[in-house]
Amino acid sequence: MKILMLSLNTFPYPPTYGGAEIRTFNLLKHLQAKHEVTLLTHCQRPVSAEEIAALRTWVTHLEILPAPAPPSPAQSLPGLLQQASRFGRFLTTATPPSVAYRHVPAVQAWVDSAVAAKKYDAIVCEHSVNEIYVRPGFQAQIRTVVDIHSSVYGWVRNHLEQGATEKPWRDRLYLPLLARYERRYCRKFSQLVVTTPDDRRQILALVPEAQVEIVSNGVDLTAFPYRLQDPGGERLIFIGAMDASHNIDAACFFAQQVFPQIQQQYPAATLRLVGARPVEKVQALAQLPGVEVTGRVPSMVEYLHQSTVCVVPLRAGLGIKNKTLEPMAAGVPVVGSDRGLEGLSVDTAAAPLRALRANTVAEYVAAIDRLFADPALRQTLSHNAWAMIAADYTWEKAAQKYERVLSS
């Protein structure tokens, strides 16, 4: 197949920058092994010549087109009027301002020309924001697929429900418009791809007639090898990009509400918050006793291997989480919330115990206490979780499913 992949919201290299980059890179890498993949992208963040050269080796063709100018609110308008202006544009155009500003006429012309010339068998949008370049009429000419990553409507609604949004009044106002937007763009595509059953339910509630397939995330087992031994101790770790709203909320919740309770039982316990781009709110957590905020680290797996337990205390955010799969692959026992363990069968009667589940402060304290005190339980979780990852959650397995979606 000849596949045109749009990743204009992220430059997908290196595949350690964030969740969208990791997923996009690994899917295209494995598709390229059997198909011709043309990747259309921007450089919206600083990207080195070495990174561009490296990405070229993983695709048939790499096209880097002009990036959109950052949105610039009218400086002459007070803040509330700026918000009203953005809401008005959303109301009339049916496209969120955060998506609309990304539209670059030169990119649209490139895509239109490629589709008209019938150069490709399928056009794939990696992340829903790339839908802006897919015209409704494309369905009659080419197979159109969008890898949604997570429902934008469901994401905002979930953040509101969990109190994890910084602007609840704005998000409540936008919510019905986001539902309208998601219905509209989903109907432009032959096939929709999501990462978990919860994601699929979110989309089908909005677009019941949609063809929705589940393609989970995966792990590169060479990048996250199983650790040779349990380090023991009382070291906790939470990993993730520390500028993402759901990770900020999780880090603050755990460090401020859960970890002090852990320290009452285990005074020597430590908590590492490991991930790039920590915002000021996360950086401030380093002032708490026993808490370390690392920022970007050279090797995430080394930090995982040094940890006794990995916590995934997410209260918001949809989709299957790399921050859960990667520690499991590395052999680190996981304690996670319903959101952190979404899409995974870890503690049902029909499956071996692969992680401990916690949603309240008391549940986290109890689960971590069990694991700190019981090396055999840590080993059980470590072994069972790794076996699940190796069997079902590698990027090779995910790409095979993705390939079937594209070729069906």
Image (spheres, rainbow, N blue to C red):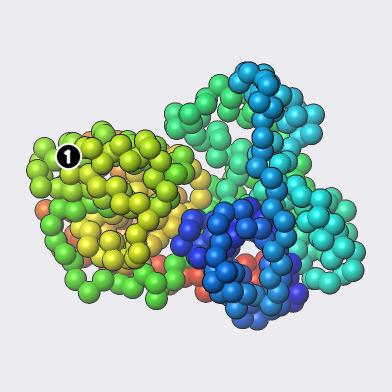
| Residue 342 position within the rendered picture, expressed as x and y whole percent measured from the top left | 44, 50
| Residue 101 position within the rendered picture, expressed as x and y whole percent measured from the top left | 71, 41
In the foreground, 57 or 244: 57
Q: Is residue 50 left or right of residue 111?
A: left
Asked whether the viewer can see residue 193, the reply is no
- Amino acid type of disc 1? Pro
**Quadrant hosting residue 123:** bottom right
Which residue is at a point 49% across and 56% down the rendered structure image? 18
Assign a secondary structure to mark 1.
Answer: loop
| Residue 2 position within the rendered picture, expressed as x and y whole percent measured from the top left | 75, 74
Label 1 belongs to which residue?
A: 289
Considering every residue shown, the one lying at the far right of the view is 116
Q: Residue 40, relative to residue 33: is it above or below?
A: above
Asked whether the viewer can see residue 118, the reply is yes
In the foreground, 94 or 109: 109
Q: Is residue 341 left or right of residue 214?
A: left
**Quadrant hosting residue 64:** bottom right
Which residue is at a point 22% across and 74% down the rendered structure image? 228
**Quadrant hosting residue 298:** bottom left
Which residue is at a point 46% across and 62% down the rendered structure image? 16
Which residue is at a point 84% across and 66% down the rendered structure image? 114
**Number of other residues with Cα within 10 Å of mark 1, as a class: few under 14, some 14 to 19, many 20 or more:** some
